[in-house]
């Protein structure tokens, strides 16, 4: 009656491994290959949820909202951290990767590997959203793929400045927002401070992104991530929106340059003013009662030395040696980040 007796789990069945499969498995076991795939897949998931929420806001009328965009990106980050947090740290953000390399938390040789995975994942996510919403985009825009104007659709994929913002105010906005992001990420993941509880980091980081969006996101669209903005912008360039995606307000370079600068400054501020002032934890004895027993009380000066038996119990050398002290785990200056 049940299906359990009709099927065998593929995990329990013995497979004949061909040389090609063995070779592929050996490649996938390499650290950098696993890291680039982790960054690719986590960034893809984050961007599909984020860009999909933007598509609903632009194309769907009452089906989408600005709050929905923040929730889409925030919980997209949460899912990305759950996917790649134990493999690559789930940066999903070239600015975060740059800061970790610049501050010595990871070697520079990993920077191009991480960024390659992030850019590929973001580009593929843009292509996915374009395919899913292709007919809705054409219906909304009347068949014209435009960058600006009342029926613009390029803003589904990348950020563009609103009319009330100037280029340099937008630059400073991106620097500040990314600095806040990195500062808070270090606080969330610093084991010496008051980090998020084990298993809750992904949700807390996602809520951080939502908070930045709902409180500070309207001026520049809070790209705060070169990997979020540049690959989808390049996709729109080749998909039919044309060179105008790079010419509109000369904005395209700001989400590439400003976030790494802001993240680096935010990381420096945390390490200098917070991380360096965290007090060291004192050493803890394994058994405090043994410490009390090992105290040697001095004889009173008015009491003459006795040649006979003494009322004081001698402290043997072996007993002192048996008192062990718990080793203290060395504190590390580097902060392993699982972050957006």
Image: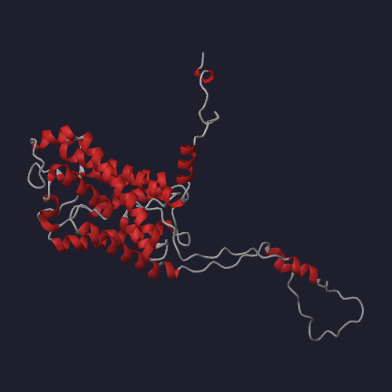
Asked whether residue 162 appears in the rendered view, the answer is yes
Q: Extreme right residue here?
A: 308
Residue at point 17%, 42% (across, down): 239
277 lies above or below 59: below
Which percent across, then down, holds residue 164?
10, 56
Tell me which corner region of the image, top left, top right, bottom left or bottom right, holds residue 258: bottom left
| Side (left or right) of 165 relative to 293 | left
Query: Which of the two residues, 282 or 11, is positioned nearer the viewer here?
Result: 11
Classify residue 238 by image quadrant: top left
315, above or below 260, in the image: below
Look at 22% across and 47% down and name the residue there: 232
Nearer to us in this view, 57 or 227: 227
Along the line of sight, the residue nearer the viewer: 72 or 159: 159
Q: Where is residue 332 in the image (x, y as percent from the top left)?
A: 49, 64
What colour scheme does the image use? secondary structure
Residue 247 in the image: state x and y as whole percent: 11, 54
Q: Position of residue 219 (x, y in %)?
A: 17, 55
Q: Is residue 318 left or right of residue 223?
A: right
Q: Tell me what residue is drawn at x 49 percent, y 40 percent.
A: 22
Location of residue 266 (image quadrant):
bottom left
In the image, 199: left or right of 316? Answer: left
The image shows a total of numbered marks equal to 0
Residue at the front extreme, as displayed: 19
Q: Can residue 61 be seen in this view?
A: no
């Amino acid at each position: 009656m049940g299906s359990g007796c009709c099927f065998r789990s593929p995990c329990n069945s013995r497979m004949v491994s061909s040389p090609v499969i063995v070779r592929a498995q050996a490649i996938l076991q390499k650290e950098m290959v696993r890291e680039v795939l982790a960054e690719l897949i986590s960034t893809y998931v984050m961007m599909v949820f984020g860009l999909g929420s933007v598509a609903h806001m632009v194309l769907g009328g009452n089906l989408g909202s600005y709050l929905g965009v923040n929730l889409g990106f925030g919980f997209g980050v949460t899912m990305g951290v759950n996917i790649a947090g134990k493999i690559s740290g789930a940066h999903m953000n070239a600015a975060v990767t740059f800061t970790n390399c610049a501050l010595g938390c990871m070697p520079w040789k990993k920077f191009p590997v991480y960024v390659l995975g992030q850019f590929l994942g973001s580009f593929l996510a843009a292509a996915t959203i374009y395919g899913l919403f292709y007919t809705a985009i054409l219906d909304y825009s009347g068949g014209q793929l435009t960058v600006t104007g009342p029926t613009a659709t390029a803003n589904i994929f990348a950020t563009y400045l609103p009319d009330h913002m100037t280029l340099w105010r937008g630059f400073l906005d991106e620097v500040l927002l990314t600095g806040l992001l990195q500062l808070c990420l270090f606080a969330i993941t610093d084991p010496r401070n008051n980090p998020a509880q084990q298993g809750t980091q992904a949700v807390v980081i996602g809520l951080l992104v939502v908070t930045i969006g709902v409180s500070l996101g309207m001026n520049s669209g809070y790209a705060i991530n070169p990997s979020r903005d540049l690959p989808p912008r390049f996709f729109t360039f080749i998909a039919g929106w044309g060179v105008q995606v790079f010419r509109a307000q000369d904005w395209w370079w700001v989400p590439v340059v400003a976030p790494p600068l802001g993240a680096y400054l935010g990381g420096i501020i945390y390490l200098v003013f917070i991380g360096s002032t965290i007090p060291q934890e004192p050493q803890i004895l394994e058994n405090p009662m043994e410490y009390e027993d090992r105290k040697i009380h001095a004889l009173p000066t008015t009491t003459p030395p006795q040649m006979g038996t003494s009322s004081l119990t001698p402290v043997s050398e072996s007993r002192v040696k048996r008192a062990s002290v718990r080793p203290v785990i060395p504190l590390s200056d580097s902060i392993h980040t699982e972050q957006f």
